[in-house]
Structure formats: C-alpha cells, structure tokens
Amino acid sequence: GFGLITLANLLWVLARDVSAPRAVPDWAILITGLIACLLVASEPQAARRAPIFVFGVGVAISAIAALAVALPGLFHDGPLDWLVRQGGVGRATGSTHGANVLGIVAAMSFAYFSIRAAGRESPRDLVLSLLMAGACLPALYFTFSRSAALGVGIAVVLGLYLLGRRAAVLVAVALIAGAVILGPILIANRLDTSSGRVEGNRDPQVAAAQANSDRLRVQAWTAGLKMAIEKPITGVGFGRYPEVRRRYGGPRELNTPHSDYIRFFAETGVPGGAAFLLFIGGVAWSLKGARDPHRAGLAAALAAFCVATQFNAQLYYLEAAVPFWVAAGSAIHLRPVPIRHQPRGGYTARDPAPSGRRHAHPNSQPWDAGPLAKAKDEPNS
C-alpha cells in the first residue's frame, strides 16, 4: 500500500512536470527496497539468511572505511576511493552526508551482531558475532554521526531487554551515559564541522558549529512540516522537496528534510506519511516478544535505523535503505503465529518442508505444546 501511494504520487508529479529530475531515481530506490522486503518476507530461507548477508556486507564496508581513514595512503585515488571520499573534505570519511550514511550502515550491523553475541546460541556464533560487531566500532567512531550513535545506544538496550538480559541492560545504560558525557571531549579535536562545504576545515569551535548544524536541521524539519500542512492530501510531490524548499523557509545547505517521517508527509501528504508509519508499526508489532537472538537482533538493527532516520533521512540512499527493508521483511516472515491459527500438528501453510510436507514455523509452538495439550488425553474431550 505504501509503495502504491508513492507510485501514484510520482505519476502525479510527472504529469505536472515531466522534467522532475529527482523523483524517478528516488522512487526507484524506494521500490527496490520494497521488493526486497516482499521477497524476504515470502521466503523462509531468505528470512533467516538475507539479514546475515546484508549486515555482513555492512561490516565489510565499515571495516574498509575505517582502514581508509587509518591508512589514507592505501586508498588514495584508488578503486575504493568512491566508498569513503564522496567528493570533498568531511568528518574523517569523506563528505558529511557520506559519513552519516556510513554511520547508519555501521550502526545497524553493530546492533544486529552485538545482540546475536549476547544471545550466545553457540561458542562459534558468539565468537563470530563479537568479531563482526567489533569491526563496526572504528567506523562508528570515525564517522562521528550523532544520530547513528544515539540509534546504537537505544538499539542495544532494546535488544538486551528482549533477550531478558536485565543486568546487561543496566550496564549498557551506564556505558551510554558515560559516552554521552565523555563523547564530546574525546572527539572535539578530530571533528570536522564543515557542514558539507568542500573547502571546510576542522573547526576549533566545535560546539558552535554543531549548534549551527542543528539549527539548519530544525529549519529543514519546519519547512517539511509546512509543506505537509499546506498540502495534506498530495504533499508537494514525491522527490520535490529540494525544488520547493526555499519557498517554505528550508535552508539552502540541506537538500533533504533530514527526517524520513517528515519527508513522506511533506512529499506525499497524509496518505503517504500515515502509510509509512503504519508499516513501521506493523514491523514493530511482528517483533513483539522476540526472544531468540536473530529476531532480537533484527529489532535492535531496525530500532537503530528508525532513530537515526529521524535526523538524516536515510531512505534516500540505497546502501542504507536495503538493510532496513531486508530486516523488515525478515521480521514480518518470522512473526509469531498464534496457536489458534495453526493447523493440527503445528504445521503452517507458508513453509514447505524438503519432504513435501509442511514443517512448523520457527517461532510457532507445536500443537501438543499448546493449551490443548492436556485435553487430548482426557476422556470425552
């Protein structure tokens, strides 16, 4: 439904202005993610393996980017230069928007594998998950993406809570509080606060520059909200925020509303914005009561994305959008199946077994373990 609403809005935009340059590629990124979500949600093996693959790719990208920062000569003007230096001086890893995108990729991958490690399914899984999560930390540090760091903190606490690790939750909260206090001190001497200007240098007045960045972000949010209020049915048109932002007081420096939630209300009106929120709510509901490490890790990764995307509109970028949609599709497929909806024997109609029969859903209880377990042996039951 969300995809159809955005498609209808895109056609409306093109009918009015066929030269709208940004709307088509933006919608292509969105529909690619939605198709990936549908494919993963409909295939049992993909629901288990696709998130591991995409977050594994995220770990690799994070590790390569961190190496490029630590050893700049290794990647200077090389084949991987595009990955970390997207055309200018930025916060240690290229342009400002590149750093934020890399930050959320590293954040989602770290959240997923750290929660898998906390789940301790096996010694091998523990070691591999710790190595994968650890490989993301340097990239998280070098990007200095505050939204990614905030997302990771909330994600880890949520994941540990779902796993029932109450003591670990307290430790995580204490570490996050310490990071909030010490973080600005630790990064103050390295942070490039050029706000995307190619000629920018590391600003000695970090606090003032961050305040300016926050001011621009609030202006972008305000402009997006004005668009949604003025045109609640259609919005200003899918992908048209950059073209009309100056009319609504949006800053010249920012080409996006810096929030996916505000973006869809601004560009596609209340129907598109409400459909997106409904989708997010449905995915969250499907992860309710997650206890196994895979589902808890998905919840953590999605939480990291949902927090960070309020500040940086990550669905504009394919490298950040694909992990989100794949994780959402996996969460939808692996949702708990109520016992009253299961056929006798605990088999579901969705997952074919190799033998040709249907096997039990990974998160469903077998029929004999349900409320009727005792009733079948009682006379006249």
Image (cartoon, rainbow, N blue to C red):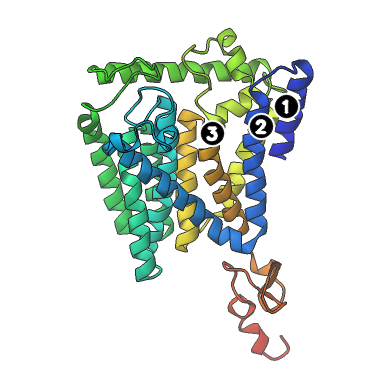
Hey, what amino acid is under mark 1? Leu
Hey, what amino acid is under mark 3? Tyr
Q: Quadrant of residue 175?
A: top left
Circle 2: is it few (<14), some (14-19), or many (20+) Cα within 10 Å? Answer: some
- 262 relative to 132, above or below: above
Hey, what amino acid is under mark 2? Trp
- 143 relative to 374, above or below: above
Residue 255 visible in the displayed image? yes
Residue 160 visible in the displayed image? no
Going from N to C along the chain, the mark reached first, 2 or 1, is: 1
What residue is pinned by disc 1?
10
Q: What mark, if any, has residue 27 been given in the picture? A: 2
Going from N to C along the chain, the mark reached first, 3 or 1, is: 1
Name the residue: 60% across, 59% down: 46
Q: What mark, if any, has residue 317 been given in the picture? A: 3
**Disc 2 to disc 1: CB gap under 8 Å:** yes
Give residue 357's position: percent from left, percent from top: 71, 77
Distance, label 3 to label 1, CA atoms, is: 18 Å
Tell which of 46 and 261 is nearer to you. Answer: 46
Of the 4 image quadrants, the one containing the N terminus is: top right
Distance, label 2 to label 1, CA atoms, is: 8 Å
Tell which of 191 and 197 is nearer to you. Answer: 197
Tell which of 173 and 214 is nearer to you. Answer: 214
